[in-house]
Image (tube, rainbow, N blue to C red):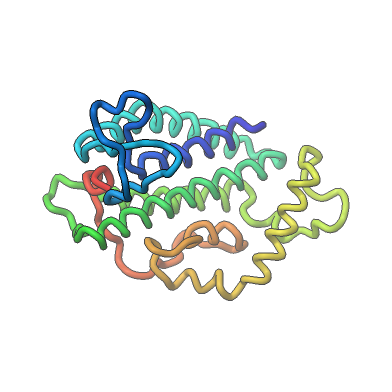
Amino acid sequence: QSDLVAAALMFWSVTRMIERWWLICGPDMLGMPPMEDNFGPCRRNPFIKAAPVTPFMDTQLDEMTIRDVLVPIKNKLLRLLKERMLARKREDWYEIYLVSFIILHNSERVLSHIMDFARRFGVNPEPRSNHESPLSHAYYQVCKTVLVYFHFASGGAAPLSLDWTGTGQGSPSMTEHQIAYLRDIKDEVRRQDAQLRDLQSVSMYDTEMYWCHQMLFPGWKADVPHSGKLLEFTEKDFLVT
């Protein structure tokens, strides 16, 4: 029922869609025979007949989807998130928490995807010319910015330290399911405290929850160091994957 959370979930879903290979399916397959087995990154679906498009067509379809679907969703998402954050209303914290988590998890998936591609096909994460700016640096700055706004403009992890077993906590707009979720998250963070804190010393590109876990602890600092050097994947690298 939240337009902000809906936009974040749509943004996450469309990003996953362009990470997959485009397929031709339906009654008219343009004369292409259906896949009989897995083909490269394409996985055969036993329930539908489908054939992969060419790599060139796959990149074109990705670019069209980014331009006509993903960018408009991104603009809407950032506009709504900015409005909620700058409003500084207590009742908006839960939405901001969910959306920040989704954005950070999306970045983790994107970076993990390109790292997997680089290992399989030998892509060198170094700039090939002075005209190519590293898009992977932009993802790093995006994650830092989301965390800064979450912790310093939106209440940060403070609500996770409240006693959610009592009454009168949180906002009147929060449901029992939402309160139960926060109670479970608090218990899970306490249980996995050591493992989560160890994430600060591992690769930001290969580790699930590297960015998301930084939402869960009060006292977060924007200048917390990262492990390893910043890789320099360009926009071209991201499109090729």
Residue drawn 28% across and 56% down?
117
Vertical relation: 217 (above or below) 150: below
Image-based side of 121 in relation to 152, left or right: left
Image-based side of 73 in relation to 89, left or right: left
Counting the numbered discs, the total is: 0
Residue drawn 38% across and 54% down?
140
Residue 125 falls in image quadrant: bottom left
The picture places residue 123, in percent across and down from the top left corner, at: 20, 57
The picture places residue 145, in percent across and down from the top left corner, at: 45, 49
Looking at the image, the residue that sits furthest to the right is: 167
Image-based side of 93 in relation to 28, left or right: right
- 234 or 90: which is nearer to us? 234
Vertical relation: 198 (above or below) 52: below
- 116 or 53: which is nearer to us? 53
The picture places residue 172, in percent across and down from the top left corner, at: 81, 39
Residue drawn 39% across and 67% down?
203
The picture places residue 204, in percent across and down from the top left corner, at: 40, 63
Residue drawn 67% across and 31% down?
1
